Amino acid sequence: MLTLKYYNPTQDPCQSWKKRKGKAEMRKIAIYGKGGIGKSTTTSNLSAALSGMGYKVMQIGCDPKADSTKTIMGGRRIPTVLEQLKAKGDELKLEDIVFEGFGGVLCVESGGPTPGIGCAGRGIISAFEKLEELNAFGVYQPDVVIYDVLGDVVCGGFAMPIREGYAREVFIVSSGEMMALYAANNIAQAIRNFGKRGYAKLSGLILNAKNIEREQEIVQQAVEEIGTQVVAYIPRSADIQTAEAGGGTVFEQLSSSPMHGVYRKLADCVLSMSQDIVEESPEEYVF
């Protein structure tokens, strides 16, 4: 019989990882999740938390809706890579597709085709190729790159962050709802398949609570069956909706929200689980 363990914030799995002092290289993280689960909200608040901690962050939206960075950009939609490619062709420059938002977060939206026409996954591939061609990471030199990826399907383009070496760590955002967990399981299977080839690894699930009955119990059972762990718990809070209605993250819109601490804790967790760290010496390890 499966023994269920509820997520306990005082026993954070991130605390079991070695936190190392030293010079950090670029951390490359992908965040997947079913559409509408709060993935982009979580990602944007994570980016804002990281920037507030002194990190230079680039957030890349990988969804044809192109709304990943909206709350970082003050509620404003930015032109997508595909739109700018179509409009400017070979004349396209980085400043046409990379925009600075709240806290200095660098924002990019891959975009997608007109609904019903073309392949959204191919749009992501084209956007990644253009960013690489223009040496975006070399020019801006971000400390952390976060790919915000639609996880309802994990085909060609949507799998780019995990199968082409763009991301090293993958986190899945889910609630305790059946379809969200179903999507999480599909994403985890794809990551395992690519992981056998030395690509990204699944670091854990971020529980974005919807306050459904027995939610933590349901999610804990699911992660044990999937073979991963809950690394963070995001409680349902009206502050998040209030901030989004104002066109921003909780950091920009609400100066004293308790959600600041929640997202900073998530940021600490993501950083501590990153592999991309240059070790200075064994003495620099802290626990």
Image (cartoon, rainbow, N blue to C red):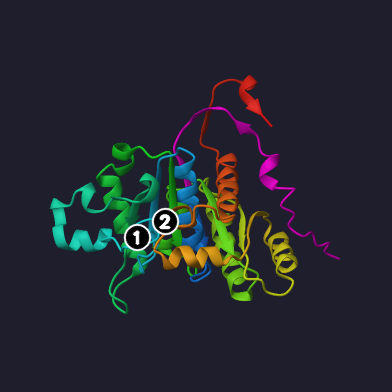
- Label 1: element kind: helix
Residue plotted at (67% across, 61% down): 226
Q: Quadrant of the C terminus?
A: top right
Q: Which residue is mark 1?
A: 124
Segment colored magenta? 1-28
Q: Which residue is mark 2?
A: 160
Residue 235 lies, in percent from the top left, at: 63, 62
Q: Quadrant of the N terminus?
A: bottom right
Instruction: Tell me if I can see residue 16 in this picture.
Output: yes
Residue 277 lies, in percent from the top left, at: 52, 32
User: 62 or 161, which is in the foreground?
Assistant: 62
Is residue 6 shown left or right of residue 231? right
Instruction: Tell me if I can see residue 150 in this picture.
Output: no
Amino acid type indicated by mark 1: Ile
User: 272 or 166, which is in the foreground?
Assistant: 272
Q: Residue furthest front?
A: 256
Magenta: predominant secondary structure element? Answer: loop
Disc 1 to disc 2, C-alpha distance: 8 Å
Residue plotted at (62% across, 70% down): 210
Residue 9 covered by magenta stretch: yes
Is residue 120 shown left or right of residue 235? left
Is residue 34 shown left or right of residue 74? right
Q: Which mark is residue 27?
A: none
Amino acid type indicated by mark 2: Met
Callout 1 crowding tier (Cα within 10 Å): few <14, some 14–19, many ≥20: many
- Label 2: element kind: helix
Q: Earlier in the sequence, mark 1 or mark 2?
A: 1
Residue 111 lies, in percent from the top left, at: 31, 64
